[in-house]
Amino acid sequence: MKGIGKFICIAEYRGNPVHSAVHTGITDYLHSEWSLLLFAVIVLLFILACLGLRYVQGIDISEEDIEEKGEEDRHQSQYFFVIRELTAREIKRKYARSYLGIIWSVLNPLLTMAVMSLIFSTMFRRAIDNYPIYYLTGSIIWNLFSSATNAAMTALVDNKSLLLKSKLPKQTFVLSRVYTALVNFGYTFAAYICMLVVFHIQPVWTMLLFPIDVLLVLLFAAGISYFLSIAYVFFADIKYLYGILLTLWMYLSAIFYPADALPEIMQAVISFNPIYLSVYIARECVMYGRMPDYVVWIKLIAAAGLSFIFGFRFFRRKQNLVMQKL
């Protein structure tokens, strides 16, 4: 009798409408989002293995080639050629010993998105719709900025021999690191587009504003990169201090949580954070199909413009001291 009673209790529990709804919801969520996510990752890995990795491994750039090109023609148009060659060399060097190579530019943000969604999607389900895309939108903007500034910080020291041998403008080496971050962003953006399709984000005209947002982030990052590249020559510990600052900066950019969850005073603080402003614009334009408030645009444009202008002027004023220090 006890066995029959236990069986009846289990049957009644499984027949409970609440239990059935929860079980159905979880099953649908796993099949509709995570299964599609896994499928999209596999497809992207195959495509990039055939195209992107082949391109990067085919690059063979040496410092002698860059120096020779700089000596042959120093016109402004040739500086862009040097930036492209330096970028190609940096990408090849970064993934030289990696089996998957540049595929990690796609795989890393997708895997991070999966982990963050698994942890926080339930916590913020009521506050955030479509959490995986919410996180990924903020993550790709943040990674563009952080990777550009981190790499550009050591640009002058890493290219010491080339700086001393050639007469190329010194900002060329800083801009090449920023451009490298943009190239990596391009691979990540391809994955981002696939995720938009997977999660049924409808195309709207406001998505056309997204490239403007990316351009403003690059200008802001370039200005910060000018400061950091000079500072690193004279004070190498800035690399570690900046790493701590980036951690704080990331938490103040509302990458994985809704800004509305913060106290009002903190919301006021992050409203002047250029990276948060860029993330907010990206989400409004892409996820929600809305035109961001013009005040946000003004703040971001001002921050990007001031950062680039003051950073470039500081770099030009201190670049001769760099040669003496090197």
Image (tube, rainbow, N blue to C red):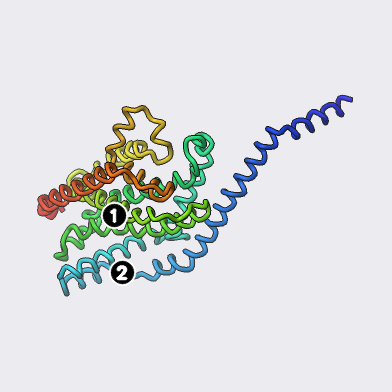
| Label total for image | 2
Depth check, front residue: 190 or 81: 190
Amino acid of disc 2:
Ile
Q: Is residue 199 above or below residue 90?
A: above
Q: Does residue 181 appear to the left or right of 16 in the view shown? A: left
Depth check, front residue: 16 or 220: 16
Residue found at the far top of this picture = 2
User: Residue 215 — which label?
Assistant: 1
Looking at the picture, how far across and down is residue 161, in whole percent?
20, 61
Q: Is residue 224 above or below residue 77?
A: above
**Rendering quarter of residue 185:** bottom left
Amino acid of disc 1:
Leu
Return the residue at label 2.
Answer: 61
SS state under label 1: helix
Depth check, front residue: 315 or 164: 315
Looking at the picture, how far across and down is residue 158, in whole percent?
25, 56
Looking at the picture, how far across and down is residue 134, in whole percent?
45, 44
SS state under label 2: loop
Q: Does residue 11 appear to the left or right of 325 in the view shown? A: right
Q: What residue do we see at 39% from left, 55% from top?
A: 205
Q: What residue do we see at 31% from left, 51% from top?
A: 213
Q: Does residue 171 appear to the left or right of 272 in the view shown? A: left
Label 2 and label 1: CA atoms lie apart by: 27 Å
